[in-house]
Amino acid sequence: MTVLAETSHPLSLEPVQLLDEHGDPADGQVLPPAAQRLQMYRRLVVGRRFDRQAAALTRQGRLAVYPSSNGQEACQVGAVLAVRDTDWLFPTYRESVALVTRGIDPVEVLTLLRGDWHCGYDPYHHRTAPQCTPLATQALHAVGLAHAARLAGDDVVALAFVGDGATSEGDCHEALNFAAVYRAPVVFFVQNNQYAISVPLAKQTAASSLAHKAIGYGMPGRRVDGNDVLAVYRVVRDAVEHARAGQGPTLVEAVTYRMDAHTNADDASRYRTSAEVDAWRKRDPITRLERHLRAVGVLDDAGVAEIAAEAEDFAARLRERMNTDPVLDPMEMFRHVYAEPTPQLREQAALLAAELAAEAEAPVGGVEARA
């Protein structure tokens, strides 16, 4: 277990990197097999095309809001590929690319952001909790599930996605502390994209890094280049194996950058410069891996075109399905929340049912039909 050996030394501020910004392998690093690297590239390309399509659908009014993953694809693809299908994911609202990588129907992924349902997919079937909008509450859910699984003897690890801003929340502290004390099989995967909406990391924490906070909780902490999908995969996989072996949680900080605004409702030009964005654009995760795969002869122009066409087809099918208005039942908002609805909810449901019935019986345009 490399994790235990490495955590016996002071935590490095230098993120783990397998490929540098030019796509060259870091010294002494063993890379995943070529076929696996190519598959990661394919996932990155499809994920970004999905993200661009979702952003376009938002501008067209098909989505109420969309928190883009543009620039953070390596974090989401690498982390998801590092866990088993039997493990659980606890995503935030920004993890749409992670959910697509998990194999969830992209329309179901976007159902929350279209405003139709609180969650468009079956969490139990996919072992993926609903995307969480409140900051850090999903970290507690992940710890609770993991702790229960450990007590039951189930072979399950929980991967909790957390943003850099969420690390300042009380829920995050409670989750980290409980998980460390009870050695819950959890990996806290912090995507440090440098901003909590408009608040830069320097105003978020005085710690040397977010990974260093692990020391205070008594768990391993790792920093990884979040734009290097191979490094993300390696570090998260090691943390998952560490948890699965009964050795407790790990806090992973993936250093990355949100290329788009926080959401379509945000104007990022008010708090960051175009020069800063351009500097990060040179660290693009897809370009980096593509350069490497071309250099080692695993990818050529025909392969790039084939994968790009696959991504375009994925986006076209998503666009076609999202342009069809769903038939919704307003009464569904009262279902799937409580096994036994509260008296207040039953009263509200009855009121809504009466209003819907009256509306259905009312004449079109509110004009009484003449006999």
Image: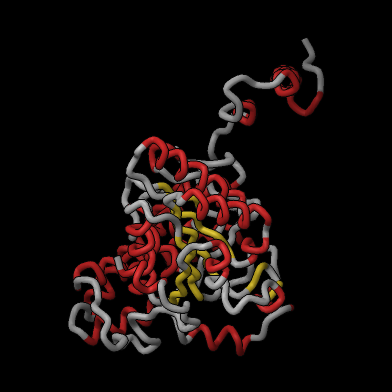
Which colour style is shown? secondary structure
Residue extending furthest right?
367
- Residue 161 position, x and y percent, is 51, 58
Q: Residue at x 69, y 63 (%)?
A: 265
In depth, the one of 118 and 232 nearer the eye is 232
Image side of residue 300 versus residue 371, left or right: left
In depth, the one of 57 and 297 nearer the eye is 297
- Residue 155 position, x and y percent, is 32, 44
Residue extending furthest top?
371
Residue 362 visible in the shown view:
no
Q: Is residue 203 above or below residue 158?
A: below
Image side of residue 333 versus residue 99, left or right: right
Q: Residue at x 51, y 65 (%)?
A: 69
Q: Quadrant of the C terminus?
A: top right
Q: Residue at x 51, y 62 (%)?
A: 218
Q: Residue at x 41, y 71 (%)?
A: 7
Q: Quadrant of the N terminus?
A: bottom left
Q: How many marks?
A: 0
Q: Is residue 235 above or below residue 315?
A: below
Q: Is residue 258 above or below residue 237?
A: below
In depth, the one of 107 and 254 nearer the eye is 254
Image side of residue 238 versus residue 15, left or right: left
- Residue 290 position, x and y percent, is 31, 80
- Residue 189 position, x and y percent, is 48, 62
